[in-house]
Amino acid sequence: MGENQPNTASTASQPAPSMQMYREEQARLRQMLDKRAAIARKLANIEADIEQKETAYLESTPNGNIIAGFDNYIKGTGAAAQRRKAGATEQNRVFSRSSVSYRPGSLTSAAGSHDSRFDSRIACAHAHIYVF
């Protein structure tokens, strides 16, 4: 039961919160949120670049590739034509799907376009910053 009691020794040594401390923490929080948003934008750009390069690779290797295998290369042009029609399927996207932030259908095809996973307003919605 003693663990639920406030430790008077530690609270007495800490200075009382002041408006100056509040503003410093507020500025620190803004910096951290800005940094988080910048990192999220950078991650979104990297993921879009990976997706673009992966699509180019899958489309440029209709006869066979490291992901789908090289069976179509041996079979000839009929199988290659069928694969060319199918294009890059979602199941072949090994690199795009390996991202921690991957959600099916939510990756953007162009870097810089809006992606709700990295919306900076979401991060700020939980941070209540009051300016006096």
Image (cartoon, grey):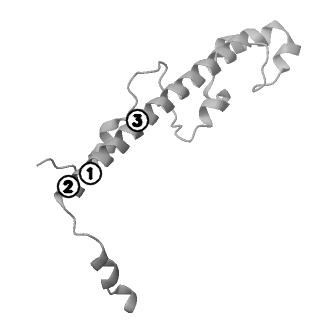
Q: Nearer the viewer, residue 84 or 10?
A: 10
Q: Mark 1, residues whose alpha carbon is within 10 Å: few (<14), some, or many (≥20)? A: few
Q: Residue at x 64, y 16 (%)?
A: 87
User: Disc 1 versus disc 2: distance between alpha carbons?
Assistant: 6 Å
- Residue 36 x %, y %: 41, 40
Residue 15 visible within the image: yes
Find numbered disc 2 in the image and state the secondary structure of the residue it sits on. helix
Which residue bears the numbered disc 1? Answer: 24
Give residue 20's mark.
2
- In the rendered view, tell whether residue 41 sits above or below residue 29: above
Task: Identify residue type, mark 2.
Answer: Gln
- Residue at the extreme bottom of the image, as rendered: 1
- Earlier residue among tags 3 and 1: 1
- Residue at the extreme left of the image, as rendered: 132
Q: How many dots with numbers?
A: 3
Q: Nearer the viewer, residue 53 or 22?
A: 22
Find numbered disc 1 in the image and state the secondary structure of the residue it sits on. helix
Q: Nearer the viewer, residue 56 or 20?
A: 20
Q: Residue at x 70, y 11 (%)?
A: 60
Task: Identify residue type, mark 3.
Answer: Phe
